[in-house]
């Protein structure tokens, strides 16, 4: 990148409608705030191509970011825009998250063409979700439901619902809101009832570690409260070795100056086993304190028997 010569900043993104919206949002913000020329490079990732198997079976959420990182490494793009919940806990050497942007609604949304809420579903109703985290928590709330796998981008999932493959589906409220589809939401889950995924609702900007000038500029756009909450959430997953094969939920929210984090872990092989739950709160004034908070709640899960649950996922 050489802004002195007027070269554009190129954003690498997946080509789904939601991902392109997110990249367009980042482009507009960078153009308006810094007067940059910004272009978007749409790419299809392996995660977008493989839809007949779960992410846990084909390599995890890293499949959504690998091609974008290759574009950064080869100089075809300067930054990548991700939904933070899709970013692996540990990035490959040479890459960093330069900014975390303010979180949209972090809750999960109940979407149905017939039923207004989870409680209104009849026994045996078919509920679609691609998330092991959601499956475990849905079964904890309604063990009488039939939880079915649901892959594809947001539009694909809504189409499958409309075609009658499911009685209801569960999606991230943030994605629906960003695409102007909040009208499809029949109800939202309280974050204490259905704990979100780490980073859910937040956007992350990834760059090469050696892109010092770009990193410094993007750092100015970080939303500190969201960043600290996400650091705590991701620390839970990192300590437990979190991956797509582990039904782990972690969500942190601010209560005054204190950050309260709640986490739940489902059994890796039997989603009907009881959830392990833990929570913790502390004053958080910097990144290290946020990580320590996440590690503390992970330790509480470990004390409750997390090792057995995690081993089953492996």
Image (cartoon, rainbow, N blue to C red):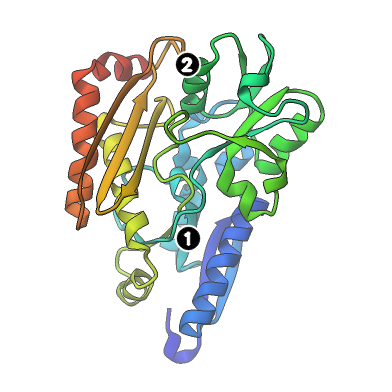
Which quadrant of the rendered structure holds the N terminus?
bottom left
Q: 101 or 182: which is nearer to us?
A: 182
Q: Is residue 249 above or below residue 3?
A: above
For image coordinates 51% across by 45% down, the residue present is 64
Q: Position of residue 260 (x, y in %)?
A: 29, 41
Q: Which residue carries the number 2 mark? A: 140
Tag count: 2
For image coordinates 49% across by 75% down, the residue present is 30
Q: Is residue 140 above or below residue 300?
A: above
- Whether residue 15 is visible to the viewer of this picture, yes or no, is no
Quarter assignment of residue 223: bottom left
Q: Position of residue 222 (x, y in %)?
A: 37, 65
Q: Is residue 313 above or below residue 67?
A: above
Between the C-alphas of marks 1 and 2, the distance is: 36 Å
Characterize the local packing of mark 2: few (<14), some (14-19) or many (20 or more) Cα atoms within 10 angstroms: some
Q: Which residue carries the number 1 mark? A: 80
Q: 37 or 179: which is nearer to us?
A: 179
For image coordinates 20% across by 37% down, the residue present is 295
Q: 312 or 108: which is nearer to us?
A: 108
264 horizontally vs 36: left or right: left
Element at badge 1? strand
Please say if the residues under marks 1 and 2 sit with CB atoms less than 8 Å apart.
no
Element at badge 2? helix
Characterize the local packing of mark 1: few (<14), some (14-19) or many (20 or more) Cα atoms within 10 angstroms: many
């Amino acid at each position: 990148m050489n802004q002195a010569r007027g070269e554009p900043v190129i954003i690498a993104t997946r080509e789904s409608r939601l991902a392109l919206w997110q990249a367009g949002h980042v482009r507009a913000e960078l153009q308006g705030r810094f007067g940059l020329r910004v272009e978007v490079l749409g790419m299809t990732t392996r995660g977008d191509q493989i839809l007949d198997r779960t992410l846990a079976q084909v390599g995890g959420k890293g499949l959504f970011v690998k091609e974008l990182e290759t574009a950064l490494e080869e100089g075809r793009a300067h930054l990548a825009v991700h939904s933070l919940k899709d970013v692996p806990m540990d990035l490959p050497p040479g890459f960093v998250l330069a900014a975390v942007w303010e979180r949209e609604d972090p809750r999960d949304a109940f979407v149905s063409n017939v039923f207004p809420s989870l409680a209104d579903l009849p026994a045996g109703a078919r509920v679609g979700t691609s998330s092991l985290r959601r499956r475990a928590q849905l079964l904890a709330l309604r063990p009488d439901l039939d939880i079915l796998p649901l892959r594809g981008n947001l539009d694909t999932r809504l189409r499958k619902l409309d075609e009658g493959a499911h009685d209801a589906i569960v999606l991230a409220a943030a994605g629906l809101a960003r695409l102007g589809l909040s009208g499809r939401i029949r109800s939202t889950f309280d974050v204490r009832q259905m704990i979100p995924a780490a980073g859910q609702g937040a956007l992350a900007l990834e760059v090469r570690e050696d892109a010092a000038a770009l990193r410094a500029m993007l750092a100015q756009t970080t939303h500190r409260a969201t960043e600290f909450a996400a650091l705590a959430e991701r620390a839970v997953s990192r300590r437990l070795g979190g991956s797509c094969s582990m039904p782990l939920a972690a969500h942190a929210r601010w209560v005054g100056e204190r950050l309260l984090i709640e986490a739940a872990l489902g059994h890796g092989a039997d989603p009907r086993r009881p959830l392990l739950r833990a929570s913790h709160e502390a004053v958080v004034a910097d990144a290290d304190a946020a990580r320590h908070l996440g590690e503390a709640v992970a330790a509480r899960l470990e004390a409750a028997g997390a090792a057995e649950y995690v081993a089953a996922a492996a």
